[in-house]
Every structure is written in C-alpha cells, then in structure tokens.
Image: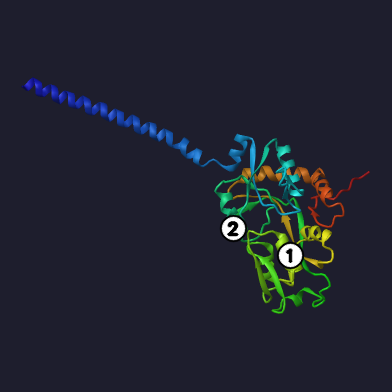
Amino acid sequence: MVLLCGLKRSSLVIFRRVNMRQMILTLLIYLLAMPAAFAKDKESTYDRVIRTGEIRCGYLPWPPLLSKDMNTGEVEGPVADYINRIGEVLDLKIIWSTELNLTTYLQDLNNKRFDMECGGGWPNAIRGKYVDYTAPIFYMPFQIIKRKGDSRFTDLVALNDPDFTMAIMDGENSAATKQLKFPKSNVVEIPSSGQVSDLILAVATKKADFTVVNTPSALAYMQNNQDKIELVEPPVKYIPINISIAQDEPKLKTMLNVATEQLVLSGEIDQILKNHDPEHASYVRVAKPYIEELNK
C-alpha cells in the first residue's frame, strides 16, 4: 500500500511537471505569434502598395476633371491621365476600384477600403481634420454662374441678400462658399449624391439665381448651352487639385510627392493640361520653384 501511494505521488509530480512544460511552451508560442499578427493588422497603405505592386483608387466621376465611359469602363480626364502616369513612373498598377460616396469616403479611406482618393482631392479645412493631402498637381478656379442676361446684380457683394437664391451641395465647395461669402442668401440644396451639373441646372432652370462651380465644368456645360448661363468674373477662389490619402502615411505621401514633382518639372503635367485645355482657360499650373535663367 505504501509503495502504491508512493507511485501515485510520483506519477502526479511527473504529470504536473509535464503539464507545466506544455503550458509554458504554449504560452511562448502564443507570445511569439502576437507580434506577427499585430504587424499584419497594422500594415500601412504604403507597405500594402509596395507588397502588391498596385494602387487601389477611390474616385467620383466629376466631368470634365474625371469621367467614366459607361461603355468601356475607362476612366478619363486630366486627373485620370495624371493618376495613370503616376502609376507608370512608379511602376505600380492603377486599379480604379471604388466609386466614392461623398458622405462616407473620408472614413472609407482611413479604413483602407481603397489606397487613395484619385478624383482631385478637393481639400478644405474640415476634410483636413481627417485625411492628408499630397502636393498640388495644378489649381482650379471657381466662379459664380448666373442665368444668361440676368442683370439684377453687377458685383458679388449684391448676392449676399435674401432676394437671391443660391444652389449648394452639402459637403461641397458651393456650401462652404455660401457660408463664407453669401450667408444672407436663400438656398436650394442639391443632394450630396448629385453632380456639379445638378448645381448648374438649378440655375439654368430658374430654381436658383446663382451658384459656385469650378470653371471647367461651367465651360463644358456652356459649349452646348451658350444661351443658358454665363460666368461672373473674377473667380471667387482657387483650389489645389491633389490626392487624398489616409492620415499617418508619411512614406506614401513622400512617394507621391516626389513622383508629382518629377512630372511637374519635366513638363508632363503641363502637357496633360494642354491636351484637355488648349486655351489655358480652365486650369492654373503649379509655379516652378526656380527662375528659368541661365548665364550664357
């Protein structure tokens, strides 16, 4: 009996030692696996782009800056040409993967549903709280449009009056411009899912007296509707056209900025803009950081 009890105690001690070793080994394996799993979850957009060799673009069709051919699926326009050229100089494949929802795209960008917003950036102070922007590719003027022949006002100051109605789109530059320059005017709101053409049509169809749109869109509309609207000079603002990226992506931002600078200094951006705007009426070039003088 004593011998049997001794054997039981000995077996129990051995079992406990083996069990403890297994627990320690399991814990070590778990601890060693944690950094790899954590690193995978925290992969930056830059690291994903380099690993896969592709950039997933989120975009919103906004003619003439960027449009999508419904028959071929091809994305066109000066911004599309720039993005595609960026892919070529970086040896990265551009995938036009996601059409944006204006109300959620900032969150979608930070949640990595796509790698960058490729529609022109459209930066403002509010958006700048949540995303980052690359260096400007070029600048775009915004102008007041009114109905052709409407002579009720001769300057922009007169529009800041309840007698005039402005068409705006929530979350877009027209809404920001109204708040800043025309707070007293009445308003007709276009859904945020709309297009810039909806703002123009609101004026052309007398739902509103005026709005603010980018000059290229207004000129494109006027090509086929010269008797409908007219531009008011001078432009009320200029905005930089660039790329939106998620916050805390310094490597991605540097890569894109270096590639953009290369295209600006080589004259390729200028040529892209000439292809779409030969009269230099719609886009303003980025100034080069030097004076072109050589001692001869």
Q: Quadrant of residue 103?
A: bottom right
Mark 2 vs mark 1: give the one in front. Answer: 1
Label 1 CA crowd tier, 10 Å (few <14, some 14–19, many 20+): some
| Number of marks in the rendered image | 2
Q: Is 49 left, or right, of 261 in this rendering?
A: left
Residue 271 lies, in percent from the top left, at 83, 46
Vertical placement of residue 190 versus 241, above or below = below
Vertical placement of residue 144 versus 83, above or below = below
Q: Is 40 left, or right, of 32 in this rendering?
A: right
Q: Quadrant of the N terminus?
A: top left
195 or 293: nearer the eye? 195
Q: Quadrant of residue 284?
A: bottom right
Residue 157 showing in the rendered view: yes
Residue 145 lies, in percent from the top left, at 78, 67
Q: Is 224 left, or right, of 160 in this rendering?
A: right
The residue located at (10%, 24%) in the rendering is 5
Name the residue that disc number 2 marks.
103
223 or 171: nearer the eye? 223
Q: Quadrant of residue 88?
A: top right
**Which three-letter amino acid code belongs to the residue tagged 1?**
Leu
The residue located at (71%, 64%) in the rendering is 199
Using the numbered discs, state the Cα–Cα distance from disc 2 to disc 1 in whole angstroms: 22 Å
Residue 19 lies, in percent from the top left, at 26, 29
Name the residue that disc number 1 marks.
201
Label 1: state its secondary structure: helix
Indicate how the structure is coloured in the image: rainbow
Q: Quadrant of the C terminus?
A: top right
**Which three-letter amino acid code belongs to the residue tagged 2?**
Thr
